[in-house]
Image (cartoon, rainbow, N blue to C red):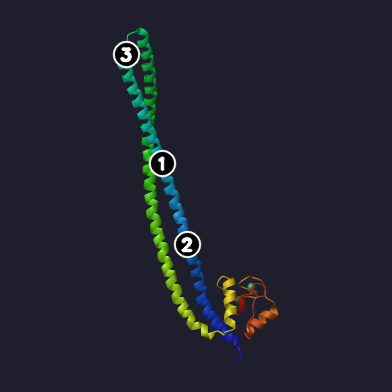
């Protein structure tokens, strides 16, 4: 049976209405994993910032412990030297121990200053950690909500596509077998639009002008005519 182009054209236009919608939906669906990754990246970055703050706090607390141990050992030394002082027999030995004690005391004041400074820094760092934790908790909540929205949208898209596919199956038999793969090839290459109307004497797909003879042939609807520039199938709306 010969192909009647005018009938094929209207069958293809029916099909394209569905296919264009499917194309838009599939493109939206394809963008979703990257959107989810972006959200997770933002969250992970905040989380590692929080981890860094926590580690800095731990390091300060360890340094404080070290300084306290240093201080305690100096204080033990002082006690030891003072005990020795009460037992020494000569002035020389006594003053040697006094010198030792004074040296240890000088170290103690340095350590005490260090500890006070560290305590201040630790307090400040604790506020930073707390702020980071709150930020992370907020972002986590927000990310989860956005991920759930994305997932819900994906489900809705998939449902709509399934419905459109079922509808599409009803329109496919009206299209001639050899024409269908040709149409689908252009559809894929041209972002879901295989058929475009003439716009005056130009192709409305690529906006290039169409030869007058070709325009006449398109209007006659005798055969399929594609744009010589972009390859889309032209029709007269
Ligand atoms: Zn064109």
Between residues 14 and 122, which one lies in front from this camera angle?
122
What residue do we see at 39% from left, 18% from top?
Answer: 103
Which of the image's four quarters has the C terminus? bottom right
Image quadrant of residue 227? Answer: bottom right
Image quadrant of residue 179? Answer: bottom right
Residue 55: which numbered mark, if any?
Answer: 1
Q: Judge left or right: residue 103 versus residue 10.
A: left
What residue do we see at 38% from left, 26% from top?
Answer: 111
Between residues 198 and 169, which one lies in front from this camera angle?
169
Marks 3 and 2 sit apart, C-alpha to C-alpha, by 77 Å
What residue do we see at 35% from left, 29% from top?
Answer: 69
Between residues 119 and 95, which one lies in front from this camera angle?
95
Q: Choose the circle earlier in sequence order: 3 or 1.
A: 1
Residue count near mark 2 (Cα–Cα under 10 Å), binned few <14, some 14–19, many ≥20:
few
Residue of label 3: 85
Q: Choose the circle earlier in sequence order: 3 or 2.
A: 2
Residue count near mark 1 (Cα–Cα under 10 Å), binned few <14, some 14–19, many ≥20:
few
Residue of label 2: 33
Residue 107 coordinates in the image, percent (x, y): 39, 22
Count of labels in the image: 3
Quadrant in which ligand 1 is drawn: bottom right
What residue do we see at 48% from left, 83% from top?
Answer: 170
């Amino acid at each position: 049976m010969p192909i009647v182009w005018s009938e094929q054209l209207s069958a293809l236009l029916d099909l394209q209405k569905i296919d264009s919608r499917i194309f838009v939906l599939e493109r939206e669906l394809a963008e979703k994993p990257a959107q989810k990754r972006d959200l997770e990246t933002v969250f992970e970055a905040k989380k590692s910032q929080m981890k860094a703050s926590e580690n800095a706090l731990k390091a300060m607390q360890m340094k404080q412990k070290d300084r306290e141990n240093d201080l305690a050992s100096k204080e033990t030394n002082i006690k030891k030297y003072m005990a020795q002082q009460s037992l020494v027999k000569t002035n020389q030995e006594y003053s040697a121990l006094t010198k030792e004690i004074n040296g240890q005391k000088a170290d103690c004041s340095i350590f005490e200053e260090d500890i006070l400074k560290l305590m201040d820094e630790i307090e400040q760092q604790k506020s930073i950690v707390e702020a980071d934790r709150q930020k992370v908790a907020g972002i986590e909540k927000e990310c989860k909500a956005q991920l759930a929205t994305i997932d819900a949208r994906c489900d809705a898209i998939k449902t709509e596509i399934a419905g459109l596919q079922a509808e599409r199956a009803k329109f496919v038999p009206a299209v001639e077998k050899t024409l269908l793969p040709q149409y689908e090839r252009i559809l894929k290459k041209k972002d879901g639009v295989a058929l475009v109307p003439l716009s005056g004497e130009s192709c409305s797909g690529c906006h290039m002008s169409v030869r007058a003879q070709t325009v006449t042939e398109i209007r006659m609807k005798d055969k399929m005519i594609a744009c010589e520039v972009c390859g889309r199938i032209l029709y007269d709306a």
